[in-house]
Image: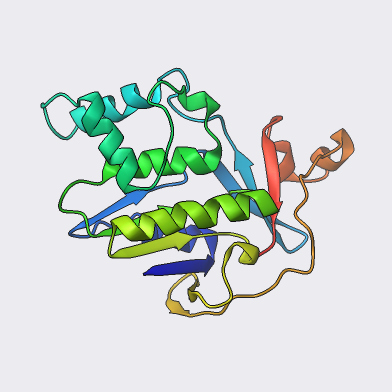
Amino acid sequence: MITYYIGNVRGKRKLFRTPRDGAASADNCDVLADFMLDGKVCFVLGDIPYADMRVGEYLAYSRSLKTRLPLSAAAAKELLKRVGLKISLDRRMSSLSRLEFRFVLLAAAHDDETVEVWLNLDGIAYSAFSRRRMGRLLGGLARGFDFVNVAVSDHRFIPKSAKVMAVTKNDVVEGRSMSASRKYIKMRFTRCKRRASLALTALNGRKTLLCDN
């Protein structure tokens, strides 16, 4: 079963980072910061972490932090298979899309005892392609685990019939899917615009994206 979470960005990050028995989580660690501008949630995107590692190397490194047993290529492929991600172990982490990167993090986090996953996809830019890609990946994820919890920052990623929870600063309540009237756009700020806002001044050339929330 897939449950989508919308609402307060920092509330979702705190909720998804909460340790739980039998659960694995993957954070949006490639998002450096978030802020509000003109009533919209903006995300500051950093580079993909572990950029110089290959996928197989990263999985082996991450697993070595939990157990001293070496991770074979076959075992690494099984980790990816269970989260529904079909990519080569030789791919460099820097070549992954942000969506693929988060799934690789989840592949490294789960084990044989995992029945529930918490995947933070806040900061993934909306497009028709990314919606289809996310839908396929989450469908595969739901086949591998009993409970799938997903945070998204754009309502258009959520199927109409899906279960939705809304996160506030202090609570989690029943939510509903909404259609967005505005298109996703990348934000490009002029020098004058940056000087006019302390938040924008602090970006220092980082990429930002605007999500409907």
Residue drawn at the location 43% of the way across and 75% of the way down: 172
Q: Nearer the viewer, residue 175 or 96?
A: 96
Indicate the position of residue 3 as horizontal and vertical percent values.
Answer: 42, 69
Q: Residue furthest left?
A: 68
Residue drawn at the location 88% of the way across and 38% of the way down: 192
Q: Residue furthest top?
A: 52
Position of the C terminus by quadrant: bottom right
Position of the N terminus by quadrant: bottom left
Residue drawn at the location 76% of the way across and 45% of the way down: 186
Q: Quadrant of residue 76?
A: top left
Indicate the position of residue 212 as horizontal and vertical percent values.
Answer: 69, 62
Colour style of the rendered protein structure: rainbow
Indicate the position of residue 30 as horizontal and vertical percent values.
Answer: 51, 38
Image vertical order of residue 157 relative to residue 171, above or below? above
Image vertical order of residue 172 relative to residue 33, above or below? below
Q: Is residue 127 visible?
A: no
Residue drawn at the location 46% of the way across and 22% of the way down: 92
Q: Residue furthest bottom?
A: 174
Q: Nearer the viewer, residue 149 or 80?
A: 80
User: Left or right: where does residue 175 sit relative to residue 211?
Assistant: left
Q: Nearer the viewer, residue 134 or 201?
A: 134
Q: Is residue 65 visible?
A: yes
Q: Quadrant of residue 184?
A: bottom right
Q: How many numbered marks, from 0 up?
A: 0
Indicate the position of residue 117 as horizontal and vertical percent values.
Answer: 32, 57
